[in-house]
Image (spheres, rainbow, N blue to C red):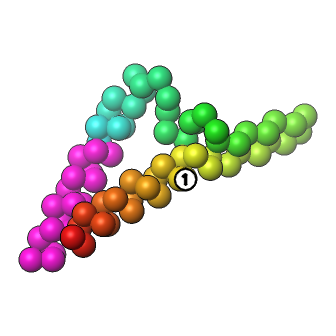
């Protein structure tokens, strides 16, 4: 029964990812370019760290894992 739930959760995650890739270009905020992500641009180099995107993905994945184990 555990494998079945895991496959269902994986299927749901894949559907959501597919929808994000399909309609993601039309959304006002792109994943990876959210407000709060750190981007520093210098004359010769730039630094980008998507901290808010990482936090959002962590929350979503934690919720999915919690639902699977439940």
Pointer 1 residue: 54
Residue 64 vs residue 25, the one in the foreground:
64
Measuring from the top left, give residue 69's x and y in whole percent: 24, 72
Residue at (16, 61) in percent of width and height: 8
Whether residue 6 is situated above or below residue 35 in the rendered picture:
below
Measuring from the top left, give residue 60's x and y in whole percent: 39, 54
Residue 2 vs residue 47, the one in the foreground:
2
Whether residue 70 is situated above or below residue 31 in the rendered picture:
below
Q: Determine if the magenta segment contains residue 12.
A: yes
Can you say which quadrant of the picture contains the N terminus?
bottom left
In the displayed image of the protein, which residue is found farthest to the right?
43
In the displayed image of the protein, which residue is found farthest to the left?
1
Quarter of the figure with residue 27: top left
For the image shown, how many numbered marks are present on the structure? 1
User: Element type at marker 1?
Assistant: helix
Whether residue 21 is situated above or below residue 52 in the rendered picture:
above
Measuring from the top left, give residue 46's x and y in whole percent: 79, 41
Residue at (43, 55) in percent of width and height: 59
10 Å neighbourhood of mark 1: few (<14), some, or many (≥20)? some
Quarter of the figure with residue 35: top right
Magenta part of the protein: which range? Answer: 1-17
Q: Is residue 30 left or right of residue 5?
A: right
Residue at (49, 33) in percent of width and height: 30
Q: Determine if the magenta segment contains residue 63.
A: no
Measuring from the top left, give residue 18's x and y in whole percent: 29, 42
Residue 35 vs residue 6, the one in the foreground:
35
Can you say which quadrant of the picture contains the C terminus?
bottom left
Q: Magenta-highlighted stretch: main secondary structure?
A: helix
Quarter of the figure with residue 68: bottom left
Residue at (64, 39) in percent of width and height: 36
Q: Is residue 21 left or right of residue 35?
A: left
């Amino acid at each position: 029964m555990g494998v079945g739930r895991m496959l269902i959760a994986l299927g749901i995650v894949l559907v959501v990812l597919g929808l994000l890739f399909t309609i993601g270009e039309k959304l006002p905020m792109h994943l990876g370019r959210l407000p709060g992500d750190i981007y520093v641009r210098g004359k010769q180099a730039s630094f980008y760290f998507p901290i808010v995107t990482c936090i959002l993905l962590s929350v979503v994945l934690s919720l999915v894992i919690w639902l699977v184990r439940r």
